[in-house]
Amino acid sequence: MKRALWTLGIFVALVALLAVGLRLDPREVPSPLIGKPAPPFELPLLTEPDKRFSQKDMLGKVWIMNVWASWCPPCLVEHPVVTRIAQSGLAPVVGLNYKDARDDALPWLKRNGNPYQLIVFDANGRIGIDYGVYGVPETYVIDRKGVIRYKHIGPLNADVVKQKVEPLVQQLNSGG
Amino acid sequence: MIPELGQIALALALAVAIIQAVLPLAGAANGNRAWIAVARPAAQTQALLVAFAFGCLTYAFVNNDFSVAYVADHSNSALPLHYRVSGVWGGHEGSLLLWTLMLGVWMTAVSWFSGHLPEEMTARVLGVMGIVSLGFLAFMLFTSNPFDRQFPPAIDGRDLNPLLQDPGMVIHPPMLYMGYVGFSVAFAFAVAALLSGKLDAAWARWSRPWTTVAWMFLTLGIALGSGWAYYELGWGGWWFWDPVENASFMPWLIGTALIHSLAVTEKRGGFRSWTVLLAIIAFGLSLLGTFLVRSGVLTSVHAFAVDPKRGIFILGLFTVLIGGALALYAWRTSRIGLGGEFAPVSRESFLLANNVLLVAAAGAVFLGTLYPLLIDALGAGKISVGPPYFESVFVPLMAPALFLMGVGPLARWKHTTIPELAVLLRWALAVSLAVGLLLPLAFGQWHALTGFALALAVWIVATALISLKKRPRGSRAHLGMVTAHIGVAVFVVGVTLVKTYESDKDLKMKPGDTVSLAGYLFRLDQVTNVKGPNYVAARAKVLVTRNGEAITVMYPEKRLYVVQNMPMTEAAIDPGPTRDLYVSLGDPFDDGSWLVKVQHKPFIDWIWVGCLIMALGGLLAASDRRYRVVLPRRRGAEVTA
């Protein structure tokens, strides 16, 4: 009887562990960049090659940077979510077009819509290295002082936006 | 229309499963014969309904019905027909349907081959299986319906994961699931025995062939999975201690322990409580494997469908089924009794040691698999446990088990003496030591561990031959046991030799370049572009010679599957009984040269041949006469009933 209860006890502990495990995401790799200033860059815009943009232009605003490429199917998956964020007016969304070609990226935007306030063009992926881009898509939340506060690897989904991105942006906007 | 019919069939199957889960168990509890009689027809009806649903999904795949969301996600009009059929189980929903179908196959088999069992026992076994089936059907219908339609229909499908577009993957999941699900029969027998309170030798005899057949399928399934990883992932590895692999290996280890423990329960009436517990754990680990693969709590190279919401459902199912069985076990275990006594040196004690070692090995794998999750749950960071851990704990546990494998079958039940064993075994010991000392020299390099492992392999074969000589007209069960043990020896030889003597080279090659490895000369002749049905590829032509004599021409490919934009390395393998040559093509350089990996893998095919022999042993053992003689009697019984 005693031995059998031991077995039950181990089983209950296992179930508890698995239940906790369900709420964790093994893909959530902590980024060393969180809490650090966003790496500086100055890049031409995708749509208007003669204009340039730097992360300094956004100082004083809470903003979202979304790394995408036309060759990346998951970007297409998350595109409606990005579009919804941009339309909700939560924060300006800046696109970083990563290791892409203009001739591919522009038709992609035409087909799927362009939710971005502006898009910078990182053709050789130099800026991606500074930001530690693991794989496209990735999304960063950057605060008024230009400090990275959150990073999401992989396609955004409605849950992540609701539970992580929205509360964080609202908190940062209300003076946090 | 057809998908809706499949949907209706699944809903009906759920209704039948409810009846099957309630009436036979209730009938067996209060002796209602009419309710007991429901068990068999209910199981068969349910299996037919699920098979019909499976046919409907296959039909949707074959006819490219992209209005069904699951088909659109896992197929494409350019996909060849055989992969459209195997695409049925290429994703989460279809895998579940396959799982349920396998359960239906097992239930039908139980309903056919249970004529010799008391009717209450059959009713309880099928009732418990009905509960399992009920859980999975509800899971499928409420969280992962394969027949969900989407509107508007997709113009074309998103294609099957290119990793799964492989002949090995066509049969690997059905085999693996036959094994996983097969342990549900042993589980159902154990729970039925706990319910009835009759855990005797007869119970062990009834569950033995089922357990052995399930174990055989699981062995084949794991071997196919490993073979698939070997040639499809393109790295030349055959086992990675990946969570998904471990998920199938843990039930295998416990299942192996269970087979041996059942032998003691049948022959000597011993280990009863322990055998029941193993039966519960074996199926529990099968469910846990399903949970780990399907919920995404662990990262893995091949966790294909991941959704935490589904994880909660499987976890609930796991808790109810296994928690319920363990609670029943805790409640009833005091009534089970202990069985025959045995001396410290006896076949029982050797089998007990075998059980302890196998369970400890499963425990070590379990710990290594769940440790990253535990650390993460405690908020202590992200880690991964790799092959060094598994190898360093697994090898020391398996070495004594391999040694005992030679002694156990020759020891007598109840009591045996060491001098008696020594007389029987001295030649085997001498031969295996000699081979262990000398054989590695034939390969040019002597390693202590290699010699030791080879000695163990020879030891197993030599003792198996002694045991055959001692019982020349032994039963098929005995022959099966000997065969399976020889399979283990073949497997050990393969693992040892490939681990010790494999060699490889990574290099940049231009057409015309040559590289030599283990006496073979590889020349890259040319790289051409080829077009497949749903991919484009660069195909290299590699000429292999040895001492100027042409051996073979190999064609490794670097493929790009266009729909999912996914590159794949398609290695070229020249298999042979004493070595595989393995060439894979890496990335091209700007100057027209390619990254090429050539590998020489001595005796690697022995790994899978060993698994095949083990499975054959299982088949032989399960087809022993004493499990079969009951069939004619059953027909007679039905006529008179």
Image (spheres, coloured by chain):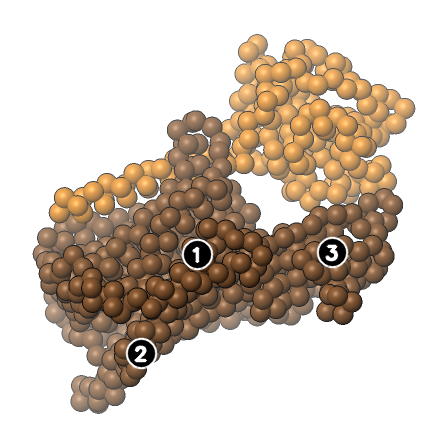
Chain colours: A orange, B brown
- As drawn, which residue projects farthest toward the right? A50
Residue drawn at 46 percent across, 69 percent down: B612
Which one is in front, B495 or B619? B495
Residue drawn at 23 percent across, 50 percent down: B326
Q: Is residue B487 left or right of residue B90?
A: left
Which badge, 1 or 2, comes first in the chain's sequence? 1
Which residue is identified by label 2?
Answer: B469
Residue drawn at 83 percent across, 38 percent down: A101
Q: Chain of mark 3?
A: B
Q: Give me the disc on residue B453.
A: 1
Amino acid on which the number 3 mark rests in the picture: Ser
Q: Residue B522: in sight, yes or no?
A: yes
Amino acid on which the number 1 mark rests in the picture: Ala
Q: Secondary structure at mark 1?
A: helix
Q: Residue B212: in sight, yes or no?
A: no
Q: Are marks 3 and 1 on the same chain?
A: yes
Cα separation between marks 1 and 2: 25 Å
Crowd class of label 1 (few under 14; some 14 to 19; many from 20; radius 10 Å):
many
Q: Secondary structure at mark 3?
A: strand
Which quadrant of the view contains residue B624? Answer: bottom left
Crowd class of label 3 (few under 14; some 14 to 19; many from 20; radius 10 Å):
some
Residue B175 image offset from top left, x and y in percent: 46, 66
Which residue is identified by label 3?
Answer: B516
Which one is in front, B52 or B168? B168
Cα separation between marks 3 and 1: 29 Å
Which badge, 2 or 3, comes first in the chain's sequence? 2
Residue drawn at 27 percent across, 52 percent down: B356
Which quadrant of the view contains residue A6? Answer: top left
